[in-house]
Image (cartoon, rainbow, N blue to C red):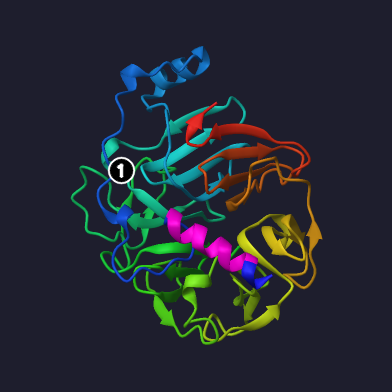
Amino acid sequence: MKKALLGMGVLLIAAGCGGVIEEEPPENNQPAEEEANSQDEDINNEETDEQDEEDGRAAVEEIEHIHDMAFDREKEGILYVGTHHGLMQADLNSNGLFWQGTEEDRHDFMGFLITSENLFMSSGHPGDGSDLQNPLGVMTSDDRGENWETGALYGEVDFHLMDANEGDSSFLYGFDAYGGRMFKSEDGGQEWEQVEADGINDRFQELYSITSDPEDPETVLAGMSDGIYRSDDGGESFTLFNGQVTMTSASQGPDGVIYAHGIGAIEGLMTSSDMGETWEQLGELPEDAEPVISLAVDFNNPEILAIGTIADSLYWSEDQGETWELLIEEGEPV
């Protein structure tokens, strides 16, 4: 299994996604290139055109680098995706794809999450036209990504992975790919402390995912190249927990159920209702969907799943992975 998983790590590094240490700022730390002229594109969707004109948002014509994604906590079927050129909203009810915020707010969003209170949090690098420092540290938005505020660790960290505990969102974890460090916050992200992460801190280039136990926020699972590691002390130390399968991406739904993309004993989507003790295969991935680098479950309706691939394709399912609909194919909306 390890050989196959290390191959996955090479792909993640090439894409600038996931748990990747860089000795120097990666290429996508630089300001994003200007977007193509939207006047040259034909949206071919009257409903989308009307909504775009009505609320002033720009329709998405192409994307580059799918990073983290998460569903809105108050509205069913509304997905947000962090990309190289900004935060995208995908309305699965109408297949509408829009950029959130102004062009100045279209940063390179790497780590991204939505807390149980519907607070948006992200990290990454400033976009084209922005005068913000690089890296962005921890940014927050209380209006669904229309406006962002810089906060803790501004100019210091680039979280490629972020986790907000489902049982107590004051507990947060972040992996800083820029400096190769793991951090924890116990006050909702106002203050952060670096944790030792003994057992995996010399192998952060093999770290794919992190998720914490809603019943015990000090318990954290980490998907590594050779399996799933577990910490019971808030990230200070990790030991191998499951050497048969790993999580290249993970998302939690209601009742603490983990949804993940697995490699190893289970290839494809899988779920666990006992915090990673046991796993079950879930649905079947669409053809050409591998490798999956991002996954999200809709808390309002856990039948709804979304996956993003390293080739910048985006799929969604409304029957827990039995069937899929393609929204974006290799960066182009379908």
Q: Residue 313, located in which quarter of the rendered image?
A: top right
Quadrant position of the N terminus in the picture: bottom right
Q: Position of residue 12 (x, y in %)?
A: 49, 59
Q: Within the magenta stretch, is there residue 192?
A: no
Q: How crowded is mark 1: few (under 14 residues within 10 Å), some or many (20 or more)?
A: many
Q: Is residue 334 above or below residue 197?
A: above
Tag count? 1
- The boundaries of the magenta stretch are 4-15
**Quarter of the view holding residue 267:** bottom right
- In screen coordinates, is 134 left or right of 68? left
Nearest to the observer: residue 39 or residue 225:
225
**Can the viewer see residue 121 in this picture?**
no
Residue underneath mark 1: 105
250 up-or-down from 240: above or below: above
The answer to if 12 sits in the magenta stretch is yes
What residue appears at the point 44 percent right and 54 percent down from the top-left corner?
15
